[in-house]
Amino acid sequence: MRISTSKSEAMVLDRKKVECLLRVKEEILPQVEEFKYLGVLFTSEGRMEREIDRRIGAASTVMRTLHRSVVVKRELRGKVSIYRSIFVPTLTYGHELWVMTERTRSRVQAAEMSFLRRVAGLSLRDRVRSSAIREELGVESLLLRVERSQMGWLGHLVRMPPGRLPGEVFRACPSGRRPPGRPRTRWRDYVSRLAWERLGIPPDELEEVAGEREVWASLLRLLPPRPDPG
């Protein structure tokens, strides 16, 4: 295997800054705190908050770029198509592995509704509920789309045969003592809690239910949206 030292960097996943010098022949690879891989930003702390913020910022840029040329036009069908084909993929790229906090949900919904209100020709002053705007435009909640995709990916991981790296990582349990401080929420714990909260499936039954492809798919199709706060 050949390694291009000019295109390679090293990063250590740890809460604290750890120096790890990787040498390729006579050159030491630069150690970084973050890098992009396949369009997703990874940080040395192992958190996804900065990537989520970056996706929201990219979606906001799309909204500003399209506002005068597309969003303000009267033709509604074309604006909804732009929302589905450009805005949503930009905002949700890589969302399957997000750990959604209340802050994240609030920010994602705010970005979603900022675009949809412009599409519908409304503003916050009109005091129209978000659910009513989505119903008028014929689009589903973006948070519902995210949760359905995340649990769909969970089912895919559960059904992976032994030896597949994503499945092995999903089932892996960290060894050793937990570092001091508030424990982080692992994606597996988050999505297990999500299945319990949204589908009523206990964690000890999750892999058995998700392992049945048709059953799992039917449950996700019936997944109801969360109560809309506004």
Image (cartoon, helix red, strand yellow):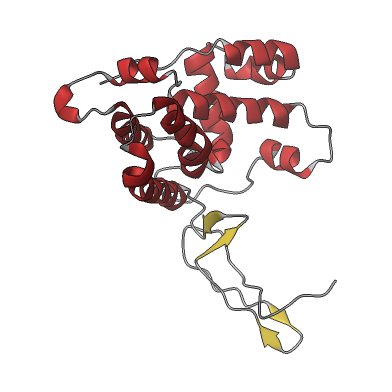
Residue 8 visible in the picture: yes
Q: Nearer the viewer, residue 50 or 130?
A: 130
**x%, y% of residue 114?**
30, 35
- Identified at 74% across, 17% down, the residue is 213
- Identified at 49% across, 66% down, the residue is 33
Q: Quadrant of the C terminus?
A: top left
The number of callouts visible is 0
Q: Nearer the viewer, residue 53 or 137?
A: 137
**x%, y% of residue 82?**
47, 36
Q: In the current view of this chain or complex, which residue is farthest to the left?
A: 125
Q: Nearer the viewer, residue 211 or 123?
A: 123
**x%, y% of residue 76?**
39, 26
Q: Is 176 rendered above or below residue 34?
A: above
**x%, y% of residue 135?**
38, 15
Q: Is residue 227 left or right of residue 159?
A: left
Q: In the current view of this chain or complex, which residue is farthest to the front?
A: 74
Q: Is residue 34 left or right of residue 205?
A: left
Q: Is residue 230 left or right of residue 43?
A: left
Residue 212 visible in the picture: no
Q: Is 159 rendered above or below residue 24?
A: above
- Identified at 29% across, 33% down, the residue is 118
Looking at the rendering, which quadrant does residue 119 occupy? top left
Q: Quadrant of the N terminus?
A: bottom right
- Identified at 77% across, 75% down, the residue is 3
